[in-house]
Image (spheres, rainbow, N blue to C red):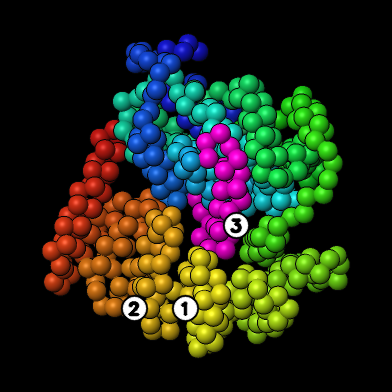
Amino acid sequence: MPRSSLAMALLLCLTPGVNRALEIEKIQLPDMGDSSGTLISPLQEKELGAAFFRNLHAKTDINQDAEIQEYIHSIGRQLAANSDMPSNPFHFFVVMDPNINAFAGPGGYIGINSGLILLSESESELAAVMAHEIAHVTQRHLYRQVEAASKMSIPTIAATLAAILIGTQSPRMGQAAMMAIQAGNIQFQIDFTRDHEKEADRVGMQILTQSNFDPRAMPTFFERMQQSTRYYGRGIPEFLRTHPVSESRIADTRGRAERYPYRQYPDSLGYLLTKARLYAMTEPNKAVVLQHFATLQNQGTAEQRAVARYGLGITHFESQQYAEAAIQFQKLVDEYPNTPQYITALARTALDSRNYDQANRLFAMAAETFPNNDVIKVEYSRSLLKSGHPERARQVLLSLSEPRRTQAFYFELMSQTFAALNQLGESHRYMAEHYFATGRSDDAVMQIRLGQKAQNPSYQLQAILDERLNFFLNDIKERKRER
Ligand SMILES: [Zn+2]
């Protein structure tokens, strides 16, 4: 395909099936010029990334668990800090999906499926895949594949990209993606070049080792992904389709890893607890999970036994067996009083069993001991809200770190808080932001209109509502224009 063809190939993850289908439907368009220069400004890239993420929200189950979010952020930050672009804004998130996949979208949005995390057997293996994705971003592979700018607007490109990504997981959405492309008169060319994959391995390996993870984990995990196809009779893991791993790639990666001296790389507690938590949350057969953790509880180091106990507690919690969960978490807190995850788990159990006084007391204590811990703050605010202390909940929410205050769950909690404070204009304003952040622009507009009708909004609030209404309407208009 000539370089001059109009192509929007932004996503690194697309199944060959969808790709072929698009080839059939391709429409030749005139050359838009510039195939080498900058196609997208940093501001456009930021907008595209945010819009892409909103669309993903609407179509996939993006994990909202504060504990899991915190872990994936922290390991992502650690890796990104050792990349060529330490100040680049990266956004790491977990998609609740059993398929083994990870992907890099525009604007530094990197998603990791829960299935991939559960397949990993060490933190370095998970880090290896994340480092590979970070390398795709820092090497700007996404934009190198963009052959020419499109006349499509950012909301439309973002929606199309998100639809294509879902197409890798659901044939129905793949159809929707195709229709969007045809309607938009654009042609996608996804080219998973071997050079890009090899470069992402090489650069990813540097990021991995500089971040103090095991370089051998990269070839080992690639091999396991290949084997999972053979041994478990599954389809090819999504990750291998979109980042095809050849024997030579594994050999190259293995060769590079062997240059580093062998040593032990212990997993962080955050990794072990995240895996235990994801397993307990996603495995439908809770009896199997209980058996799994009960067995592990009698093996390994003191820390590993504690993690197994945590897994037991989470499984009970997920099954709403709060008394049993509390027994496990209380033991952990007694033994490890300085581990925030154990205190949070105990406090959440108190909250969900409506033991509000105990929950608030535990959260308050934890918030004082760990003043910078956003997970505790999020859960504490929920507890305050449920127990009828909305003003204190609002204060705790406002003390969250800045990135947290742009996330969908924050807007929802703020909306609930203002509703409890009987400030309905503010409540609708935040609900609008929640809907917009999760890809529901029409519902966002409705919330703004409800906010405008609320009693006595301040002049300042009115101005905000007007401004946001225009913004949301514009977003909807731009997408409709191209349909
Ligand atoms: Zn790749």
**Mark before the other along the chain sequence, 2 or 1:** 1
- Residue designated by label 1: 383
- Measuring 65% from the left and 85% from the top, which residue is drawn there? 323
- Measuring 50% from the left and 80% from the top, which residue is drawn there? 364
Q: CA distance from mark 2 to mark 1?
A: 12 Å
Give the magenta range.
60-86
Q: Is residue 345 visible?
A: no
Give the residue type that dot 2 points to: Glu
Q: Is residue 116 visible?
A: yes
Give the residue type that dot 3 points to: Tyr
Beta carbon of the mark 2 residue lies under 8 A of ligand 1: no
- Measuring 55% from the left and 53% from the top, which residue is drawn there? 73
The numbered mark at residue 51 is none
Compared with residue 108, is residue 19 higher up or lower down, i.e. above or below? above
- Residue designated by label 3: 71
- Residue designated by label 2: 391
Q: Is residue 69 magenta?
A: yes
Beta carbon of the mark 3 residue lies under 8 A of ligand 1: no
**Nearest the eye: 473 or 200:** 200
Image quadrant in which you'd find residue 335: bottom right
**Mark before the other along the chain sequence, 2 or 3:** 3
Image spot of residue 105 (x, y percent): 49, 38
Ligand 1's image quarter is: top right
Q: Is residue 196 magenta?
A: no
Beta carbon of the mark 1 residue lies under 8 A of ligand 1: no
